[in-house]
Image (spheres, rainbow, N blue to C red):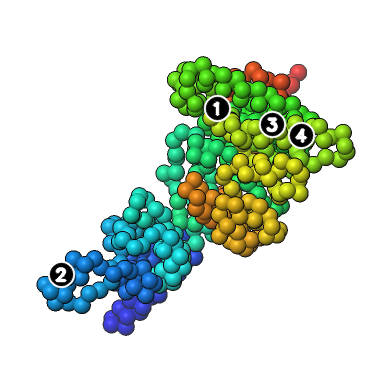
Amino acid sequence: MTDLSTVLETTGALAGAGGLGYAKVRAPRVYWSLVGLPVTWGRFSFTYRSTMDVCGLTVQPSRLRAFLARNIAHTEVQPVPPKVRHVRGTSTGLRVTLRLPAGLEPADLVAASERLRHAWGVHSVTVAETKPGHVELRMTGYDVLRRVRMPRHARPEGLAVPVALREDGTAFVRDYRQIPMALTLGANNSGKSVYQRNLIKGLAKLPVALVGIDCKRGVEQSAYAARLSALVTNPDDSASLLDVLVAEMESRFDLLSLHGVSDMWDLPAGLRPVPVIVLVDEVAELFLISSKKDEERRERIVTALIRLAQMARAVGIHLEVCGQRFGSELGRGATMLRAQLTGRVVHRVNDKQTAEMGLADVAPDAVLTASMIPAERPGTAVATDSTGGWAKIRTPHTTRAEAAAVCREFAHLVPDLPALDPYRPNVPAIVPVSGPSLVKPFPVTD
């Protein structure tokens, strides 16, 4: 009987260890909740002060505190680390709120984040400033970008769409009120098209007008025709459509001037025009010319894009520009337009210079990270945010058919904009797939 108990105990222990090993690989959230979180929380609690000390994240105490330590407590004066205000566990990591003492700034913790990651045995540590004097350490227990699962609570309000997952386990939200214009760069098969699909899939559910400019004869955006207010597929039509958008922008400015406001969102809801999102695929096709007679068309396009990028935010017209490269080699006006595109998302690129085009002027320390994105991880990118920082993100895989189905489902949200009617794409009728007849035949008898 004793031998049987020993066998059962051993078998149970082996099964439990095997189950945890399987969960660590196939269900990392379960493994983190059962094993990783308690171990990391305990390691953080027991080693916090010493870790902060060796990482150079302590300061000398105030004179009053030093006096009390020497004369009242009769103890040695110790350096002061940031005060731990709150610790909470999540399904992907650990969140720690710290109050910084005088002499420390968030940049000090950012510089030491790699050392903190190794000290506490987590996958990554990112630092976010929550309010003056307070920061949040966001520790991730495992690689959340290996298999992307968007947070269930990532449903922002307003003109915002969650499109990807950050390395710290939070959602990367494309908020047009915070960042009205954006540029997305990436090589072939880098996940740039998937990023755009997720963006269109989210925007299709909002009360906005979607305008597509796809000079690849519409092969990317024609599937979303049911939800598009306008779609052009060649540079000539693009030039005329952009002129219409500039005229629409000017008429909206007249409306703002009439009501004495400087922003569309200050108008009453009944007078507020619908926001317009302009989706440009392969922006280089709008700049390139094949002969001298195309220069006039190029100047029209570039001038219209720059005017929209500079002023259209106030009237609710936003640019979402995509391309493989976007530098001065495209010609006059390219760098000026790029400077107006505040948001930057850079996927895997073929050369460091392309990463510098997208990130060097807004987040120079992110250029190296963007240059090292592996090819076997499509959808991974480096994205800047409204605070001036940057983060590594990855877009969940979305097929073209899934995005097109959402566009058809919300086709009733296409707003009434008469100026865009000439560019409204033809929506092909859905023909039912032929199948076996459901009518049972009756034999003909004499």
**Is label 1 or label 2 in front?**
2
| Real-space CA distance between mark 3 and mark 1, rounded to the nearest whole angstrom | 15 Å
Q: Rounded to the nearest whole Å, what is the CA distance between mark 1 and mark 2? A: 60 Å
In the image, 173: left or right of 308? left
Residue annotated with mark 3? 304
Find numbered disc 1 in the image and state the secondary structure of the residue it sits on.
helix
Location of residue 260 in the rendering, given as x and y in whole percent from the top left corner: 47, 20
Q: Are marks 1 and 4 in contact (CB under 8 Å)?
A: no
Are discs 3 and 4 less than 8 Å apart at CB? no
Q: Earlier in the sequence, mark 4 or mark 2?
A: 2
The numbered mark, 3 or 2, whose residue comes first in the sequence reads 2
Q: Is residue 13 above or below residue 188?
A: below
Which sits earlier in the primary sequence, circle 1 or circle 4? 4
Amino acid on which the number 1 mark rests in the picture: Val
Q: Which residue is mark 2?
A: 68
Residue 299 is labelled as 4
Q: Give the CA distance from mark 4 to mark 2.
A: 73 Å
Q: Position of residue 190 (x, y in %)?
A: 66, 53
Name which residue type carries label 3. Ala
* Residue 224 spot, x, y in % from top left: 65, 33
Q: Residues within 10 Å of mark 1 (few under 14, many from 20)?
A: many
Residue 126 in view of the camera: yes
Q: Amino acid at mark 4?
A: Glu
The amino acid on which the numbered mark 2 sits, given as a three-letter code, is Leu
Height in image: 57 above or below 393? below
Whole-Å distance between the Cαs marked 3 and 2? 68 Å
| 1 horizontally vs 277: left or right | left
